[in-house]
Amino acid sequence: MRGIVIASHAHLADGMVEALELFFGEQPQLEAVNLLPGDDLVAFSGKLSDSVARVNDGDGVVVFCDLPFASPCNVAGSLLNRMSVDGGLHVIAGMNLPMILEFLGSRDGSEMNASDLIRVGREGMVDLNARLGERTSD
């Protein structure tokens, strides 16, 4: 089973894990790594690489990051060149709850690719007013 690491600013990663476990219960091979104000990026990189190593059972790891090209994503991206991960390492930035729920639901069976996960994430964003045909006063 592929491991999952969620990397974010502040405690968003912790909140995502808590939300995921509300739906799926406690999950093996799932960890959060938070970049807090004042944290050193070298230390954060060490925490992230340690987390990736812990969740990998040989089937690889997906790191979901909060923002593309922000510090957690950049550090995760640097691991692609610096860290050998049995089964591979994949980094997806711009995470949301629908995409990670989809991945959790399928990680024991057929593997979804990054394009599928990004599509699910996009489809999980809805303008409810427009969907319900209501107008807003902007």
Image (cartoon, rainbow, N blue to C red):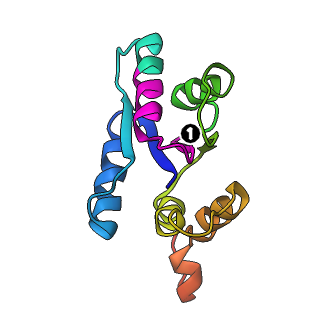
Please tell me in which quadrant of the rendered image residue 80 appears: top right
For residue 114, above or below residue 108? above
- Pinpoint residue 53: horizontal percent, then vertical percent: 46, 31
Q: Which residue is situated farthest in the bottom direction here?
A: 133
- Pinpoint residue 99: horizontal percent, then vertical percent: 54, 61
Please tell me in which quadrant of the rendered image residue 92 appears: top right
Q: Residues within 10 Å of mark 1 (few under 14, many from 20)?
A: some
For residue 17, above or below residue 71? below
In this view, the residue in front, 67 or 130, is: 67
In this view, the residue in front, 79 or 41, is: 79
For residue 115, above or below residue 48? below
Report the span colored magenta: 47-66
x 59%, y 80%: residue: 130
Indicate yes or no whether the magenta region holds residue 48. yes
In this view, the residue in front, 94 or 105, is: 105
Indicate yes or no whether the magenta region holds residue 54. yes
Residue that carries the numbered disc 1 in the rendered image: 67
x 47%, y 47%: residue: 4
